[in-house]
């Protein structure tokens, strides 16, 4: 009986849940990823040489509650939503062969996108000048190879022109924490577990929808 | 006597005989072993992607293409096409899973087919290539692109406009690791100032194919008719001319030709023996000659510099140094082969990493990737790269934002290949050389002939 009640309640709640983002959109300012000017980079090590892979493609959006003053942000918790993703196969090194190994290890065919979802954003102190980058503390969920981990990192935001925002940041992760065994090429090299992720992400303001 | 027969104990040989670990220990290094059990990757068995391909035209070269593709794990042969049913039947052994069709348009209608490899007679390239590009397929077209400049231009322009598709001309040496290694070597100035270049292609064969069916025989012998053929210089010499012009890093100023029918007077109007002399800037000339009447010394290309000459034969190359040229150092240890009274220093790509240099003669290397295989491998990788970039871009941003998409695609690193520009320029050189040969006169190249407006 209880189950049925919950089901009914769920059925009633569903349309409301779906409608929520639509209502909320009116109070949020949205910035969408731009097709150029972004770069995500992974730096790692191996027994032979250090390696780097890059993607110039970062999709997604960031939304701020309309009350948030981007020009003079006040310290405290920031009401923001952000989801970004990278098509895993757009991550490239200098070697097609090494890329093949990487895609295999991050299970690219089953998990074609690497996704980041912001869960919390806080501004510790107000920027010293209008042009200075705004540095937030962020918490979010990073999903690679189908495994989600919580990550925390400082993210720097700079205003570019009137309607663009540039975000930069970096953090360190371990391949094994995402269930990825560091790749080894027998007799050639073994990669290290530690990977540094860094990014530059450019987004432009979306025209307000009413 | 081959110099390699002499037993030498040099550093390279010594190192080859000892293990890497021993060497590291001798150098005071300690092998660091990863503590966690790592997953080993076997690159040979990994299939990174597969491109569904179709081959159109299954003559001798078409079958060569088909055979090569059938050995590539990145190619999935889904269709083959030839207007002659017996050719389709013959192709089945190389591509048992591929559907055989007589009309290429069936292949273009098939949404599954992503890439079309065109190996039809030269004069039939245009129709198939234009339709394939129109249908959104990635296209590999054999060289020469066409038998007329008008056709080659139309194809190159269509390929240029198809920004989301890969177009590759079958000038396969452009994808060869060996040739690219040579190019870098030449660019460093190791051969000194360029003096001249020479290409030869000798074979004793009629070029004629027979068939019980008169119409079929006429179709088969398209190379023997001026209407449809660009002759020896266009069908064969184009690869040599393209490579040498690439090495010379210049476009020719003029070409003078000579041709005669010496051996095969069977009603054909295409010469069986030809010479073309291309003039390049700064007095550098490239002589290109071919015959179907004598096979002596087969085929090779030579680039002469004031310090050294470089000879290429198939996938191999040698350097012949002048006595007064500066010592490079490494040539002391390099493999050498004797050519009558000349000593050729083998130029092997990645020689320091491989065992190819050392005790074996460059002529004894058991297997090396053919340039056709390299070219087709490059093509398939590029199709996958461009194809997935277009798809991922479309899923992330506005797919109609053409300028942004083009910018993104321009940043994709592609495998070395001859694109539409290289394919077109080589066709212009070859077609004009054939014209000079047939007329027995000099043709001056106009700059605009090479440009695609």
Image: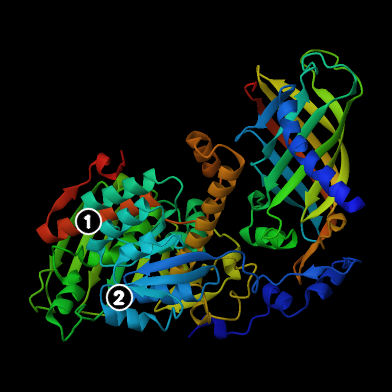
Confirm whether circles 1 and 2 share one chain: yes
Give the image location of residue B305, x and y in percent: 40, 56
Is A56 placed left or right of B177 in the picture? right
Report if residue B170 is visible in the image. no
Is B25 placed left or right of A94 in the picture? right
Number of residues whose C-alpha sits closer than 10 Å to that of mark 1, classed few (under 14), some (14–19) or many (20 or more): many
The one nearer the camera, A141 or A5, is A5
Give the image location of residue B360, x and y in percent: 57, 81
Is A75 placed left or right of B98 in the picture? right
The one nearer the camera, B453 or B350, is B453
Residue sitting at 48 percent across and 77 percent down?
B337
Number of residues whose C-alpha sits closer than 10 Å to that of mark 2, classed few (under 14), some (14–19) or many (20 or more): some
The one nearer the camera, B279 or B290, is B290
Residue sitting at 59 percent across and 38 percent down?
B397
Give the image location of residue B332, x and y in percent: 59, 69
> Of helix, strand and loop, which one carries label 1?
helix
* Rendered position, B451 above or below B2: above
Report if residue B450 is visible in the image. yes
Is A141 placed left or right of B238 in the picture? right
Identify residue for label 2.
B59
Most extreme residue toward the front is: A1
Identify residue for label 1.
B431
Residue sitting at 64 percent across and 42 percent down?
A57
The one nearer the camera, A16 or B76, is A16
Residue sitting at 75 percent across and 47 percent down?
A42
How far apart in space, not on screen, are marks 1 and 2 (Cα)? Answer: 22 Å
């Amino acid at each position: 009986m209880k189950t049925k009640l919950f089901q009914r309640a769920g059925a009633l709640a569903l349309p409301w849940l779906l409608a929520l983002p639509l209502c909320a959109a009116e109070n949020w300012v949205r910035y969408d990823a731009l097709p150029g000017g972004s770069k995500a980079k992974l730096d790692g090590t191996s027994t032979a040489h250090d390696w780097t892979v890059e993607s110039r493609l970062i999709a997604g959006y960031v939304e701020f509650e309309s009350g948030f003053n981007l020009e003079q942000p006040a310290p405290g918790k920031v009401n923001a939503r952000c989801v970004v993703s990278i098509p895993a196969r757009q991550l490239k090194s200098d070697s097609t062969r090494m890329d093949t190994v990487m895609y295999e290890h991050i299970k690219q065919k089953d998990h074609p996108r690497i996704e980041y979802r912001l869960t919390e954003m806080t501004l510790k102190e107000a920027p010293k000048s209008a042009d200075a980058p705004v540095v937030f503390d962020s918490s979010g969920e990073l999903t690679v190879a189908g495994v989600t981990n919580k990550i925390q990192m400082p993210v720097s935001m700079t205003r570019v022109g009137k309607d663009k925002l540039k975000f930069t940041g970096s953090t360190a992760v371990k391949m094994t924490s995402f269930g990825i065994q560091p790749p080894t090429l027998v007799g050639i090299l073994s990669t290290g577990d530690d990977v540094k992720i860094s990014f530059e992400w450019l987004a432009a303001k979306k025209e307000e929808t009413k | 006597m081959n110099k390699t027969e002499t037993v030498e104990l040099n550093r390279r040989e010594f190192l080859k005989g000892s293990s890497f670990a021993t060497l590291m220990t001798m150098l005071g290094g300690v092998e660091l072993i990863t503590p966690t059990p790592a997953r080993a990757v076997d690159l040979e068995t990994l299939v990174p992607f597969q491109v569904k391909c179709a081959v159109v035209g299954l003559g001798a070269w078409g079958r060569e293409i088909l055979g090569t593709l059938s050995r590539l794990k990145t190619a999935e042969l889904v269709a083959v096409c030839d207007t002659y049913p017996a050719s389709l039947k013959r192709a089945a052994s190389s591509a048992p899973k591929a559907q055989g069709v007589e009309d290429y348009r069936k292949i273009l209608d098939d949404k599954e087919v992503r890439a079309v490899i065109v190996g039809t007679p030269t004069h039939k390239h245009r129709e198939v290539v234009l339709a394939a590009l129109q249908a959104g397929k990635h296209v590999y077209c054999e060289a020469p692109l066409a038998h007329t400049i008008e056709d080659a231009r139309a194809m190159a322009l269509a390929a240029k406009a198809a920004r989301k598709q890969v177009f590759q001309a079958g000038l396969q040496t452009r994808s060869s690791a060996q040739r690219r290694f040579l190019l870098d070597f030449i660019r460093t100035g190791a051969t000194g100032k360029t003096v001249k270049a020479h290409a030869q292609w000798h074979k004793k064969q009629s070029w004629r194919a027979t068939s019980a069916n008169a119409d079929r025989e006429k179709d088969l012998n398209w190379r023997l008719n001026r209407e449809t053929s660009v002759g020896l210089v266009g069908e064969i010499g184009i690869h040599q001319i393209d490579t040498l012009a690439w090495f010379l890093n210049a476009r020719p100023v003029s070409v003078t030709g000579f041709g005669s029918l010496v051996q095969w007077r069977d009603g054909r109007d295409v010469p069986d023996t030809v010479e073309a002399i291309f003039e390049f800037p700064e007095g550098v000339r490239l002589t290109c000659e071919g015959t179907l009447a004598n096979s002596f010394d087969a085929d090779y290309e030579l680039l002469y510099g004031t310090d050294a000459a470089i000879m290429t034969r198939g996938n191999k190359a040698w350097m012949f140094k002048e006595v007064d040229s500066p010592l490079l150092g490494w040539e002391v240890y390099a493999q050498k082969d004797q050519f009558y009274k000349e000593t050729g220093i083998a130029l092997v790509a990645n020689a320091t990493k491989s065992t190819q240099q050392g005790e074996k003669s460059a002529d004894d290397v058991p297997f090396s990737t053919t340039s056709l295989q390299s070219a087709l491998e490059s093509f398939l990788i590029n199709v996958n790269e461009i194809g997935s970039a277009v798809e991922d871009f479309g899923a992330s941003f506005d797919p109609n934002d053409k300028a942004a998409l083009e910018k993104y695609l321009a940043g994709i690193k592609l495998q070395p290949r001859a694109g539409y520009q290289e394919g077109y320029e080589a066709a212009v050189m070859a077609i004009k050389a054939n014209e000079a040969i047939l007329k027995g006169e000099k043709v001056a190249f106009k700059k605009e002939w090479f440009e695609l407006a």
